[in-house]
Amino acid sequence: MRGPAAGTERRATKMKKASKIKAVKKAREASQAGKAPKMAKTKTPKRAAAVADQAAAEAAWRARHLRDVSQASGAERELEELVFGDSLKVEEDELLRRLGEPPRVAATERKSLQADSSDSEVENEAKGDLLPRKPAWVDEDDEAEENVDMTHKYRKDFMKSDAEKTLTKKKLKRRLEEQFQQAMGGVPAWANLENRKKSKRTSSDSESDEDDDLLRRTGNFITSSESLPRGILKMSTCLPANQERFADGKLVTVQFHPSAQVVMTAGHDRSVSLFQVDGIRNPKIQSIYLESFPIYKARFSVDGEQVIATGTHHSMFFVYDMMAGNIIPIPKVRGVEERFLRNFELSPDGSFMLLIGTSGYLHLLSMKTKELISTMKVNGRCTASAFTPDSSKIYNYSKEGEVFIWDVRSRKCLHRFEDEGSLEGQCIAVSKNNQYVACGSSSGVVNLYTTDVCLKENRPKPVKAIMNLVTSATCVTFNPTTEILAVASRDADEAVKLVHIPSYTVFSNFPVFRRKQIYLAQSMDFSPRSGYFSVANNKGKALLFRLKHYSSF
């Protein structure tokens, strides 16, 4: 029958076709694996030849690659092996191990690097141990000491006595260094060579430690500037310094003790009082009463052991010895023909007391014996005086608006100049660093000069004319850091202004706007480190303000 036979034939043809397809697949797999199957040899000779040619080309390429690699340097060979793998098919673990190792350096390269490092070490040691070279020759004229004429007007201030008319250059240099250190309060850090060398050695070590410390903690790393900022003065109002004992009437003097945290007040109620300053209670320490002696002015001595007080209508004055607790009256000084002794100044070195008399007379007394040393005379009437910080000169402000500069040792007038626009002189002050002179006149204008210009010119130009007062300027004073100039008038309420010296601008937040607090200012003073500022008024109060920029008393 046709049906079954035809089905068997169809199945046989299908099986043959399937076997052929399997054979072809095996041949392709074997060719890809580099093996020549038996069927390919017998049935596909062209493909077998192509596979053989490909294998021969690959072998030739490998041989050429090995030859090139053998001729390359050690570093290049290392790099090629790490990136492409070596010709022997390095295993994966071996490849990872080589990637983890530090890079290898050829022996010749290693020797050159060691030589370079040893040379740099030798150079560094040589630089550290380098000795100063000896000069090729020595000039005898260079070794001869040259004398400098000290009588010149620009060098007179450096003479300690009249015998020092000439000084060698070395002594003059030493004298200038001493004066600079005295003005700066010691040797500045930038001028100390030893500290600079130590800082250079330790800077490299400390930088890493500082960075680590910076990363270990969090917080506010922005600090306030050391210099006083302009515009607004950070301050707070404390209880009055004499809170436990107000004066009966006008308080004419307020002054901080030069070394202790104490303030003194004195007034027309014939009393001198001492208070401890803590900004909270300000407890009273002591009060003394001078019978029938309304006080015009009182001042601490420089050592802080005495208080000198003059009266309003007396030719004598009192000295209060705080250590012994004695009140010593000083009767009329021999040689001083004055009806009243009121205004006076004490030298910063504690050696002299200057009495300002009438008709332009100035009487210089010894602070130790309270006896007259010399008398000086200015044209017109002297209204105010001020010593320079080194006590070598005296500035006298006359009623006619002229300023006379006196040499304390020789008692001679060194120079005089006219205060610009002054109709009548009222008050004068010299800054603690001897850089500025402030002159206040009856018109309310306070002119600020530099001392260098005052010593050279007859009509100097002020660096700033402060015109914030509308009545007569009766009191001017600098703070110890010469960053604030306080100006005041006793002829108007709230007439007190604080001037920022570097910018010559007035602090806008003092006194408080539309709030009567100060009234008529009679006297002003800053504490030794500018932490406090006090104003004595006509109500018998010593107002106290805490200046927050300054950390200590």
Image (tube, helix red, strand yellow):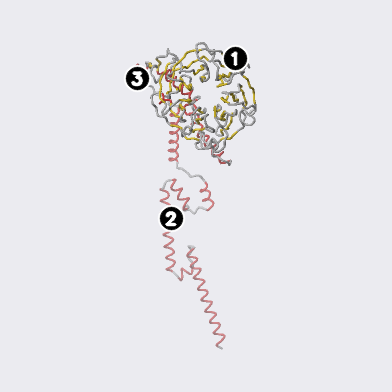
| Circle 1 residue | 328
**Mark 3 crowdedness (10 Å alpha carbons): few <14, some 14-19, many ≥20:** few
Classify 105 as above or below 86. above
Task: Give residue 547's position: percent from left, percent from top.
Answer: 56, 33
Is label 2 in contact with label 3 (beta carbons under 8 Å)?
no
- Callout count: 3
Q: Residues within 10 Å of mark 1 (few under 14, many from 20)?
A: few
Label whose residue precedes the other's in the sequence (1 or 2): 2
User: Quadrant of residue 458 in the image?
Assistant: top left
Q: Measure the alpha-carbon separation of dots 1 and 3.
A: 70 Å
In the rendered structure, which amino acid carries the disc numbered 1?
A: Ile
Name the mark nearer the viewer: 1 or 2.
1
- In this rendering, does residue 425 appear at all? yes
The amino acid at mark 3 is Trp
Q: Is residue 32 left or right of residue 543?
A: left
Given residues 535 and 381, the one toward you in this image is 381
Q: Residue at x 64, y 26 (%)?
A: 245
Percent of width and height locating residue 355: 50, 17
> Nearer the N terminus, badge 2 or badge 3?
2
Task: Name the quadrant of the C terminus.
Answer: top right
- Kindly give the residue lying farthest to the top in the view shown: 334
| Residue on which disc 2 sits | 62
Residue 525 shows in the view: no
Residue at 43 percent across and 47 percent down: it is 76
Q: Residue at x 47, y 13 (%)?
A: 374
Q: Secondary structure at mark 2?
A: helix
Q: Secondary structure at mark 3?
A: loop
Tell me the mark number nearer the camera, choosing from 1 and 3: 1
Q: Which mark is residue 137?
A: 3
The Cα–Cα distance between marks 2 and 3, rounded to whole angstroms, is 75 Å
